[in-house]
Image (spheres, helix red, strand yellow):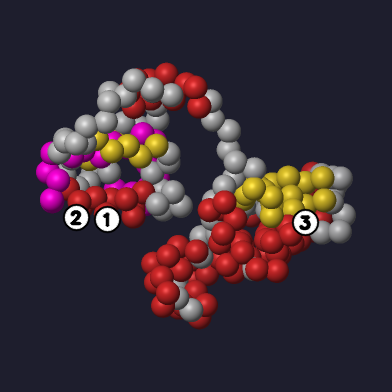
Amino acid sequence: MDLNEHWQKNVLKRFEAPAVCISFDSISHLLFREWKNKSKLILDLTIGLPQYRIKIIHGDRFQNHMLEELDEERKRLFAIYREEVELADLILCGSQFTKEPVLYFYPGYENKCRVIPYGADVEKFNFPERQFQQRENLKFVFVGRLSWRKGADLMLDVWKDFVKSHPQAELHFFGIPDQEINVDQLPANCFVHGWTGTRELIGYLRS
C-alpha cells in the first residue's frame, strides 16, 4: 500500500488531470481524490472488494461492525477500496462475482457497474474427446496467482480435509505464489508448478 501511494504521488507530480483516467483497484484512491470532477474516473475492479472475504467467512452472521474489529492494515485496505468505489464514475467488473461485493456494501452504486468478462480463447482450451470417469485418482487444478485475493489459502484449507477422505486425489497449482502462501508446508498431494505458458498449461490440463 505504501508503494502504491508513492507511485500515485509521483504520477500526480508529473501529469495533469487527463480527460479519462482508467486505473486499477488499490492503486487509484489518491489519483481519484485529486482528479475528481476533472477527469472521467474509471475503476477497473480486478477482484471482489476484499472486505467481502469477511462476509464470506461469517456468512449470514456477518455484520458491518466486524470490519472495524480487524487489524489496522486490513482496515486501511478496506478504506482504500471504499474511497475508490465512492469516487469512481464508472466501475468495470471482470465478472458478476466481482460486481456482487460492490452491490452488497454499496447497493446505491449499481448504476456505476459494468460487467465486462475477461476474455479467453475457448477453442484453445476445448477438449471434446475428454472421457469423464468415476475414479478416485482425480486431479484438481488451480490456475492463477497463489494469494489471499485469489482464495488460494481457502483452497488449501478445504484440501486438507478433502485429501483425508480422497488420498489418491491430487491438487495442482499453476501460478506464482505470494509470500503469504507458504508453499513449503503444503497439505498432502499438492504440487506447485509456478508460472506456466499457455501451451504447456493446456498440455497439463489435457493430462
- Whole-angstrom CA distance, mark 2 to mark 1, is 7 Å
Left or right of residue 151: residue 64:
right
Q: Please report the residue visible at 44 percent of the width from the left and 49 percent of the height from the top.
A: 150
On screen, residue 33 versus residue 145, left or right, reads right
Residue at image point 34% right, 27% down? 205
Where is residue 197 drawn, in percent x and y? 43, 23
| Amino acid identity at mark 3 | Asp
**Which circle marks residue 89 in the picture?**
3
Q: Is residue 147 visible?
A: yes
Around disc 2, counting alpha carbons within 10 Å, would you say few (fewer than 14), some (14 to 19), or many (20 or more)? few
Residue at the (77%, 46%) spot, across then down: 21
- Residue located at (49% from left, 22% from top): 123
The amino acid pointed to by label 2 is Asp
Q: Quadrant of the N terminus?
A: bottom right
Residue 198 in which image quadrant: top left
> Is residue 54 something that shows in the picture?
no
Magenta segment boundaries in residue numbering: 164-182
